[in-house]
Each structure stands twice: as structure tokens, then as C-alpha cells.
Amino acid sequence: MSSTEERADAPYDVLVVGGAGVDTVVRVDTLPVPYADSYGVPPIREWAGHTGTGVALGCAALGLATGFLDLIGDDPQGELVRRRLAESGVQFDPLMSPHGTRRAVNLVDAQGRRTSFYDGRDPQLDLRMPPDHYLPHLRRARHVHLSIMHFARFLFDDIEELGVPVSTDLHDWDGLDGHHREFALRADLVFLSASGAGERLADVMRRIIADGRAEAVIATAGAGGAYVLAREGGGSLRHVPAAAPPAPVVDSNGAGDAFACGFLYGRLVGLDLEDCTRLGAAAGAYACTGEGTHTTLIDEAGLAAALAEDGPAGGADQGLRENAQEGRAGGPAAVRS
């Protein structure tokens, strides 16, 4: 069997579904931008971006065997995404969408904060991914991460039947919008941003646990750290402090996706929820130190170094150092059968 054939049949540590697109990044002095007829800005740049791309790239950078499925356009933006993923070693198997590749325009200020104008492109009701396309990939996956694209919700039944653990990111869900609810209630691990629910955050997290199947809900709060609620935790939220960025913050685009990657890495090597969250915090902080979307991605050695500086609990940094020193190209031995 050729190396290409072996790779095509090899298992994925993580299979990402949905969420490819392109970010156009505009640097501004401050947010919100005061009204004016025009502004002069630094060079405007485009990057392969959006949440699914970020999770796929971040997992691959951590040495995890990563697959990615989505619907994108046969257009220059789709080619930008395909090229970036191919360079990273992600196995990307897209179908063509007649609506084109998703876009976003992100305004990023001098402190690295951003406001995103998202063009999802997908009419919510007409796009589906055929089972004969996604089922062979699901059968190879040890973990699936579903982006909250409408078509992705139709994979839940098959994922559940196959017994594959699944995560999702609800982003800035307010706990009310119906589009997110099925993802919130059918995933085993649920990520979300604390900004969406505001003062109702704890209630929203508890409702996800009470009404759904999640083992844990993880809310990210930027420089405020993260909050973890476990099904077995007695209903109390645990706070995990933010990690210190290793360099000045330049751009926060993709920090939440990087957080998810660090967390999933920890999960796959058998760490507890708190250590997984601390890995996520380290990966998210690292992602903020480079310009552009998904351009500054932490690797295994970087995670180990970040945890060592932070004074890790449970000896997690030792296991990470061992993984990094082994230098495997297919992910941690702990997730290999």
C-alpha cells in the first residue's frame, strides 16, 4: 500500500466539520470606530479564517491527525482556504457550494480587540452534506468537532450511532437563539464565549448540562480566564485564570478556536478538565501574539513550556514534555489504538 493510501485510511484524532472561510482584516485605532466618511488604514489583508479552519489548523499544529469537512465555493477565497490547509497537513475534503466561500470583515484595534462582520453565505435550509461523503470520515474519527453550520446538525444522529465523542463551540450564544440550541444539547463538550450570556452565564451553562448530554461546558472570558462546569461537579463553576501571553497582544482573531484546540489536545492525552482548560488558555493567549487569523499556533513543546511556567497541577507538563520529545507526526500516543 502506498503512503498516500495509508494516509487516506489512517484514523483522525480530530475531525472538524464546517466553519471554513476567509477573513478580511482591517486595522483601526480604536473600537468602536467613530463615524467618518473615510479613514486611512494599514494594508488590508486576507487570511484563511473562521472557526472550523482555526480548530483544524490548531489541532494539526499540536501534532494531532486532523481531518476537515465543509462546503466551500469554487472561488479565489475557497482556493486560499484549500492552500492554507494543505500547507498545514490537514486532510481537507470539501464539497462545492453554489453560494461561494464564507467571508468576514474583521476590524482589529491597537489592543488586538476585534469586531467581526460575518457573511455566512449559506442559506440555512438548502445545504446538506450527503452521508456517503461524511460517513467514511466519521468512521475514522476518535473525536468530532462540529461548527454551528446548519448542515452540520444533520450529522448528530450518525455521530451518536457511531459512539464518537463530539464537541462544539457556541461562540457568543445568549442562551436563547434557537439556531444554537441543538448543538448545545447534543454535544459532549460545549465551548462558548462568556460575552454572549453576560450575567446569565452561569444559568446558561447549568441549563446546557441539565437539558443536554454535555459532560462539561467551558466558557471563555478572554483576559478574565475561563469557567468550567462539569456534570459531575455538583453544579458549581470553577474559574481557571487566563494565561499570560508570551509576547504583546496583536490580534485576538482565532483565540477562541485556539483555546478549543489546546483543550481537546489535553482531553485526548487524558488530562482532567482543569488541566485541559489551562492548556486551552495557553493556546488562546499564544494565538493573540501574531497578526492575522490562525497565523500564530502553539505546538506541543509550547504547551509544555507554558504549563511549566504556570506551575501546572497534576504533573500535566511532564506528560506534555514526553509527547513533544517523542516528536510523533500523527498525534499523541495516548490516543492511538
Image (cartoon, rainbow, N blue to C red):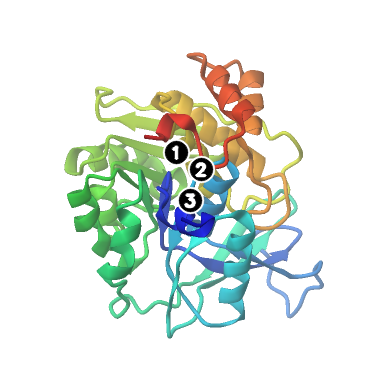
Is residue 273 positioned above or below 140 on the image? above
Q: Do the residues labelled 2 and 3 touch (CB within 8 Å)?
A: yes
Q: Tell me if I can see residue 223 in this picture.
A: no
Q: What element carries label 2?
A: loop
Q: Pick whichever of labels 1 and 3 is earlier in the sequence.
A: 3
At horizontal 30% and vertical 74% (from top left) the residue drawn is 128
Callout 2: few (<14), some (14-19), or many (20+) C-alpha neighbours within 10 Å? Answer: many
Pick out the residue farthest to the front: 1
Residue at the spot of label 3 = 66
Question: Based on the displayed image, in which of its 4 quarters is residue 26 positioned?
Answer: bottom right
Callout 1: few (<14), some (14-19), or many (20+) C-alpha neighbours within 10 Å? Answer: many
Q: Is mark 3 on a helix, strand or loop?
A: strand
Q: Where is residue 78 in the image (x, y as percent from the top left)?
A: 56, 75
Q: Nearer the viewer, mark 2 or mark 1?
A: 2
Q: Kindly identify the amino acid type of the residue bearing the numbered disc 3.
A: Thr
Which image quadrant: the C terminus?
top left
Whole-angstrom CA distance, mark 2 to mark 1, is 10 Å
Q: Kindly identify the amino acid type of the residue bearing the numbered disc 1.
A: Leu
Query: Which sits in the foreground, 172 or 245?
Result: 245
Q: Nearer the viewer, mark 1 or mark 3?
A: 3
Q: Is mark 1 on a helix, strand or loop?
A: helix
Q: Tell me if I can see residue 197 in this picture.
A: yes
Disc ID at residue 264: 1
Q: Do the residues labelled 1 and 3 touch (CB within 8 Å)?
A: no
Q: Position of residue 74 (x, y in %)?
A: 52, 82
Residue at the spot of label 2 = 64
Whole-angstrom CA distance, mark 1 to mark 3, is 12 Å
